[in-house]
Amino acid sequence: MPAKKNTTTLKKTPVVKGKSKPKKAKKRHGNKWKFRLIVLIIVCSVFSPLYYGKVLKSAVSTARWFHDLFIFDEYPHYEKFGIKIPRKYYVHGIDVSSYQGKIDWQKVNAMEFNGIKINFAFIKATEGVTLVDPYFQRNWRESKNSGVIRGAYHYFKPLKSGIWQARFFLQTVKVEAGDLPPVIDIEESAGLSANELIPNLQDFLNEVEKRTKVKPIIYTGYQFYKDHLRGNFEGYPLWLAHYYQPKLKLDVKNRWDFWQHADNAHIDGIKGRADMNVFNGEFEDLSALLVQKTKD
């Protein structure tokens, strides 16, 4: 028996425009917002101080690497300073006393030649238990006002009490946050044996550290250090004088912080000649060495 044909006609459902969007359009719209979000994150990162700090530090390091790679003179002469300056050091300073007379510290701070400028200055304050440098207070005040990082030093007399010398020094110098640590300048033994010299020197260091809450810097000559001090005072910042050399050579374990490499530099604002120094590190390292706070 033949099957009957289905004569029922299916009605088409009309499509109402504007009621729904195709799925592909929704997907494209979502991707668009994701893209905008990614772009926003990148822009915020690029323009943030943290990002720029890292980029700038990397750029400076890379530039210095290329500069050092193609310049082979390890001990170039800098005409304006009138001396040779060891390469690969980027923080420079001077040390002064009444010997330099009246200093124009604004000119000192403004001086710059081939990327080298005066970042810090060590200033003589006292000697023994009676002598105050006549230019100290002026140099101490004006160096800070000009923007030069300052530090004070005491010339140590081995035959005088280390404790009394420290107290005399601290009566003269008011150490403030942002200053370099106090310095003891030891250049003579006065005939004392190591068993006599070292404890007296330690007394000075202990007294200064107790009063200022910061470890003092030890300054001495290269040969004096090797003959009298090496092996003692580990952990104290070290400042060595060793002139007219392209490098300061010490044992690997003996780390130095400052190097007085010349005693005849021409510095704007100073009529005579001055000692020139380098710091063994970046400016950030020097900042970390500064006095962070002082005793109330």
Image (spheres, helix red, strand yellow):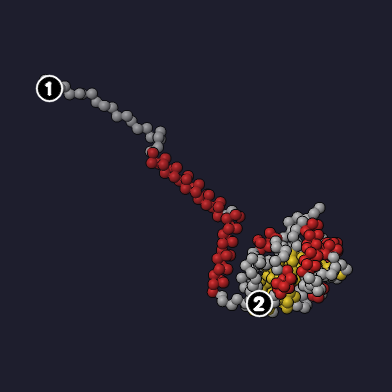
Decide which of 98, 247 is in the foreground and name it. Answer: 247
Q: Residues within 10 Å of mark 2 (few under 14, many from 20)?
A: some
Q: Residue at x 49, y 49 (%)?
A: 38
Q: Residue at x 39, y 39 (%)?
A: 23
Please provide percent x and percent y for residue 111. Answer: 70, 72
The residue type indicated by label 1 comes to: Pro
Q: Residue at x 85, y 68 (%)?
A: 160
Q: Residues within 10 Å of mark 1 (few under 14, many from 20)?
A: few
Q: Is residue 77 above or below residue 141?
A: below
- Quadrant of the rendering where the N terminus is positioned: top left
Q: Which residue lies under the disc numbered 2? A: 245
Residue 168: quarter of image: bottom right
Please provide percent x and percent y for residue 156. Answer: 81, 69
Decide which of 102, 208 is in the foreground and name it. Answer: 208
Please provide percent x and percent y for residue 240. Answer: 71, 71
Q: Which mark is residue 2?
A: 1
Q: Is residue 98 above or below residue 181?
A: below
Left or right of 35? Residue 168 is: right
Q: Return the residue found at the far right.
A: 130
Left or right of 289? Residue 2 is: left
Q: Which sits earlier in the primary sequence, circle 2 or circle 1?
A: 1
Give the label, 2 or 1, closer to the camera.
2
Q: Residue at x 61, y 55 (%)?
A: 49
Please provide percent x and percent y for residue 211. Answer: 81, 57
The residue type indicated by label 2 comes to: Gln
The reply to whether residue 24 is visible in this rendering is: yes
Residue 145: quarter of image: bottom right
Residue 116: quarter of image: bottom right
Disc 1 secondary structure class: loop
Disc 2 secondary structure class: loop
Decide which of 268, 287 is in the foreground and name it. Answer: 287
Instruction: Tell me how far mark 2 sits from mark 1, CA to CA.
Output: 118 Å
